[in-house]
Amino acid sequence: MSMAVVGMIAGMALGFAGYFGGFGAFVLVAALGAIGFVVGRVLEGDLDLGDFFRPRDDRRR
């Protein structure tokens, strides 16, 4: 099982604690599952968070 899947399952398990709250809990589970998936991809090395924070053009001033 890949780290991305493990991260997604962990996020959903944490969100499942709020399951009994109705639609808000559904949104919570989905959001935490997505966060867990992204964290798993980062830990696996498939996603580099630095790409999100660098400027698009690397021109130096």
Image (tube, rainbow, N blue to C red):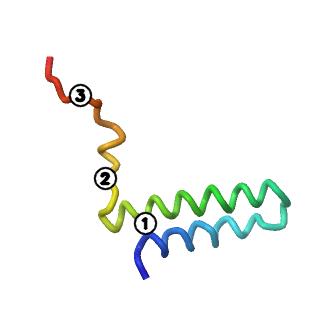
Q: Which mark is residue 10?
A: none
Tag 1: Cα neighbours inside 10 Å, few (<14), some, or many (≥20)?
A: many
> Which callout, 2 or 3, points at the residue further toward the start of the chain?
2
Q: Amino acid at mark 3?
A: Asp
> Which callout, 3 or 1, points at the residue further toward the start of the chain?
1
The image shows residue 24 at horizontal and vertical percentages of 79, 54
Residue drawn at (64%, 72%) of the image: 13
The image shows residue 43 at horizontal and vertical percentages of 35, 65
Left or right placement of residue 55 versus residue 21 in this view: left
Q: Which mark is residue 57?
A: 3
Nearer to me, 56 or 54: 56
Cβ–Cβ under 8 Å for marks 3 and 1: no
Tell us which disc is closer to us: 2 or 3.
3
Tag 3: Cα neighbours inside 10 Å, few (<14), some, or many (≥20)?
A: few
Q: Quadrant of residue 9?
A: bottom right
Residue drawn at (48%, 73%) of the image: 5
Q: Amino acid at mark 1?
A: Gly
- State the residue lying farthest toward the bottom: 1
Disc 2 marks which residue? 48
The image shows residue 18 at horizontal and vertical percentages of 76, 64
Residue drawn at (43%, 66%) of the image: 40
Is 4 rendered above or below residue 30? below
Tell us which disc is closer to us: 3 or 1.
3
Q: Quadrant of the N terminus?
A: bottom left
The image shows residue 54 at horizontal and vertical percentages of 29, 35
Q: Amino acid at mark 2?
A: Asp
Residue drawn at (34%, 68%) of the image: 44
Q: Quadrant of the C terminus?
A: top left
Q: Secondary structure at mark 2?
A: loop
**Label 1, label 2: how far apart the Cα atoms are:** 12 Å
Disc 1 marks which residue? 40
